[in-house]
Image (cartoon, rainbow, N blue to C red):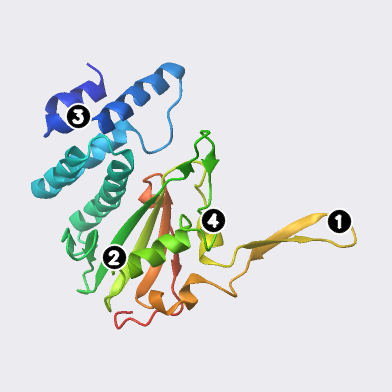
Amino acid sequence: MNRIESIEQSFFDKDVLNTEYLLRYRRTYYQQLQDGWQLAFKNYESILDCLISIFENNNQYGKSYCSRIKSEPENMRSCEAIMSEAFVHNYYIPLKNENLIKSIELIEKECDLIIEENSNSKRYYEILTLMPDIGFDGVYEIKTQRQKEPSSLRQKILEKIRGRKQFTKNRKNIAAIDLNDISITGNFHVLSSLSNGYKAKINLETGVLVPGEYDWSDNIFDDELTKYIYAVEWFDRGDYSQRRSLINWNYKGNDK
């Protein structure tokens, strides 16, 4: 019996293992093993490990994530969003166990995740999962890095404020972005969308392209709607331990 089979045998929710979402990850995992490679961090094994870790820390929370996956088992985007939340949650469990933070809470009506620091200050996380849209011809239509497109990161954040009233309470709100496809991982798509884009430069004497920079003359934090977003964090394919962050220099919340 290999490790995966051992985990499956003792897994706390057998039904979730039979959802189309996890079965797809399982098939992909074994196919990649057969081919001699494995996609970094997020795979069938890491998903199971994450859910088990949360369950062992808090049975109710572990069951909650599985229940949500079972409620939409064939909706891959929805299930991916659930696991993005779970990976962020799981990151903080060792910190809680070492008393580096005070508590981890799931209160659906408030936000996706609440982290209480030892100082009693709280951080309220809304976790966004970004995946490029697939065109009718199977080609990726990547618009994440733009500023005005509805599928851009900037507009997705603003729509959460306008439409869902997220990030509107005066508190330390964090937008955590899971870049859930290898075509958009890294920093470019996030920084380009939050700013006014990346501006390349050309040496007029040599005609050679030289390193450019991001133009922050028109950025998301200049929008009054974002005044209660304390920071934007982003990470690649569930690996929250490697997150990067940008503090909102126009943050107007009381908790700083």
The residue carrying mark 2 is 164
Q: Quadrant of residue 112?
A: bottom left
Q: CA distance from mark 3 to mark 1?
A: 57 Å
Relative height, residue 223 to residue 59 (above, below): below
User: Where does residue 150 sit, x and y in percent of width and height?
Assistant: 46, 58
Q: How many marks?
A: 4
Q: Secondary structure at mark 1?
A: loop
Looking at the picture, which amino acid does disc 2 mark?
A: Arg
Dot 3 or dot 1, earlier in sequence: 3
Q: Does residue 58 show up?
A: yes
The residue carrying mark 4 is 145
Q: Nearer the viewer, mark 1 or mark 2?
A: 2
The residue carrying mark 1 is 207
Q: CA distance from mark 4 to mark 2?
A: 22 Å
Q: Nearer the viewer, residue 146 or 135?
A: 135
Q: Nearer the viewer, mark 3 or mark 2?
A: 2
Dot 3 or dot 2, earlier in sequence: 3
Estimate how packed mark 1 is, as few (under 14), some (14 to 19) or many (20 or more) residues with alpha carbons within 10 Å.
few
Dot 3 or dot 4, earlier in sequence: 3
Estimate how packed mark 4 is, as few (under 14), some (14 to 19) or many (20 or more) residues with alpha carbons within 10 Å.
many
Q: Secondary structure at mark 2?
A: loop
Looking at the picture, which amino acid does disc 1 mark?
A: Gly
Q: CA distance from mark 3 to mark 2?
A: 32 Å
- Which numbered disc covers residue 17? 3
